[in-house]
Image (cartoon, rainbow, N blue to C red):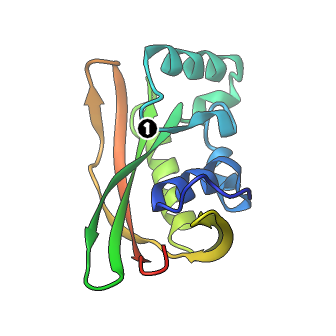
Amino acid sequence: MTAPDSIDTASVVYNLLKTGDGGADVRALLASGADSVIEAGLVNASTIQTAYTARLALTPSGVGKALIIIVRDAGEVPEGPGMSTETVAIDILDIGQGYRNIRGVQQKLRKVLLQPHVVNVVANGDAVRGILQLTFGGRTGHRFDETFSVEFETIVFQAQVETEWL
C-alpha cells in the first residue's frame, strides 16, 4: 500500500480500503471495486449515477453489490498530552436493493477495519510504518437521502493516535 499524503486516520483508512490488501474483501462488494471507494467531498449525482450504471452492466452479479462508500474525516478530540482520538465515518450508499447490500458492506467493513493493520504513512515528510487499530464507534442504521434518492448507512470508527511525534 502506498503512503497517503498525511497521517490522519481518515486518509489511512481511505488508502487501505482503496488500494490495500486489507480492503480487497470490501472492494469485492462494491459495483466498481476501487473506483467505488471515494473520499468525502467528491460525491455528486453524477458519481452516484456512474456507479449505478456500472452495477447495471454487471447484471446479474451486480445486484449484490453496493454502489459506493465514502470515507470522511469526522473529527479529532485531544485525550491528554500527546494523544488524541480521531474519528472516521464511512457512508455506504446504494439504490433500489433495500438494506441487503448495505448490510453486507457494513459487516465486511467491521470485520476488516477492526483488525490491526500495518500501514505506511507520512509524518513530517518522512515515510514511516505504523499500526492502524480502530474501534467501533457506532452506526446510524438504514437511512434514505432524498436529495440523491439513495439509501445509506454511516458506520463510525475511532483510533487513538499518538501526536507527540507528528
Residue positioned 68% across, 58% down in the render: 3
- Left or right: 7 as drawn, with respect to 55: left
Residue at image position (61%, 38%) is: 30
From the viewer's perspective, is residue 104 above or below residue 99?
Answer: below
Q: Which residue is mark 1?
A: 40
Tell which of 31 and 62 is nearer to you. 31
At 39% from the left and 77% from the top, the residue drawn is: 160
Point out residue 15 in the picture as x, y percentages from the top left corner. Answer: 62, 52
Q: Residue furthest front?
A: 124
| Residue at disc 1, secondary structure | loop
Query: Does 165 sit above or below residue 29?
Result: below
- Side of 78 relative to 9 (left or right): left
Amino acid on which the number 1 mark rests in the picture? Ala
Q: Position of residue 96 (x, y in %)?
A: 43, 23
Residue 76 sits above or below residue 69 on the image: below
User: Horizontal placement of 48 versus 17: left or right?
Assistant: left
Figure disc tally: 1
Q: Nearer the viewer, residue 108 or 96?
A: 108
- Report the residue at 67% width, 39% height from top: 34
In the orientation shown, which residue stands out farthest toward the bottom?
81
* Residue 59 position in % (x across, y down): 68, 21
Location of residue 162 with respect to 146 vertically, above or below: below
